[in-house]
Image: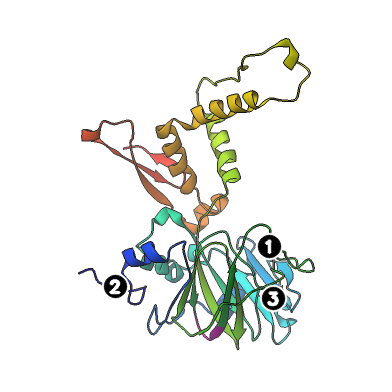
Amino acid sequence: MTKPHPLLGKLTADEFLANYWQKKPLLIRGAIPNFEPPIDGDDLAGMALEEEVESRLVIGNEWKLEHGPFDLDRFKTLPKRNWSLLVQGVDLWIPEVADLLARFDFLPPWRKDDIMVSYAEDGGNVGPHFDYYDVFLLQGFGQRRWQIGQWCNENDKLNEKSQLKVLKHLDVTEEWLLNPGDMLYLPPMVAHHGVAVGQCTTFSVGFRAPAATEMLDDLATELLSRDITPKHLTDPPLTAALANKPISKAYVRQVKELLLEVLDDEQLLAEWFAQFMTEPKYPSLVSMTEECRSAALVNLSDDDKQQSIIHYVNGQKQET
């Protein structure tokens, strides 16, 4: 009998993936028993002083947004409550934070994005919102009250006064108070709102979910860089009467077929995807962060009996 996964309470990894992953939220009490956060608010503030580190402050009930790097004096002038400091990619700078990623061994490593750590004074929050990606919210020290609500889409109304994408309405369906070591999993598009109860930190383990437009843009760049004879658009059957007519459905079908023909090369698509998904989060900082994103790919051009593996690291194919 398969044992429960250490991070998922009473669930096995397969049970979680089948019933919760990208399907519904899950609260896991004591996901990491006796959790001792490897970083605190002072550490985060120190990181936020550095130009290379991506950081933000969110202040007050109108969620005023400020981007780092910050001066030390800025932290001395913050109010006593109702503000949050968020630092992206903390796993790239603090090895003990990066070690947390190993606990998520039931998911492909190339799907992982980064660990954002937030520090908040009492009442601090970033407003009710939804994300386009999966996220695990691990409570560090202190407590945070989480509310979850409706499934959202791009048409949900936002608070026009906020610099953040804050939802205008949150229809609360569940509410929990998280303590150190508790963890909340949220699939994409689920409305949620977390408010600090006293001082607290939260570790947000996010997973990459690139938009189709982002992928198409990157794929087009990759195709242009390759020594491939390009295919060109040809006309569907024409008549003189069509010369002054709007673009016909036949032309649209012709364009679609041309583009699909490009995408039909599975080996090319697989190689591009492995390259794309292993691109470093901050390419210009790799020498400092020593970031290493990797993936293995089955060579689809091999026959079934002798399939080889291609390895990609930081967007580069590794020669063997």
Q: Which residue is mark 3?
A: 72
Image quarter of the N terminus: bottom left
Q: CA distance from mark 2 to mark 3?
A: 45 Å
Label 3 packing within 10 angstroms: few (<14), some (14-19), many (20+): few
Residue 89 is inside the magenta segment: no
Q: Which residue is mark 2?
A: 4
Amino acid type, callout 3:
Leu
Q: Nearer the viewer, residue 286 or 156?
A: 156
Q: Which residues are magenta?
A: 140-144
Q: Secondary structure at mark 1?
A: loop
Q: Which residue is mark 1?
A: 156
Circle nearer the N terminus (3, 1):
3
Q: Given this view, does label 1 or label 2 mark the residue nearer the observer?
A: 1
Q: Is residue 201 above or below residue 111?
A: below
Does the CB distance between marks 3 and 1 fall below 8 Å? no
Circle nearer the N terminus (1, 2):
2
The residue positioned 59% from the left and 39% from the top of the image is 217
Where in the figure is residue 268, as x and y percent of width and height? 44, 33
Q: Given this view, does label 2 or label 3 mark the residue nearer the observer?
A: 2
Q: Is residue 98 above or below residue 288?
A: below
Q: Does any portion of residue 292 appear in the rendered image?
A: no
Image quarter of the C terminus: top left
Q: Secondary structure at mark 3?
A: helix
Q: CA distance from mark 1 to mark 2?
A: 37 Å
Amino acid type, callout 2:
Pro
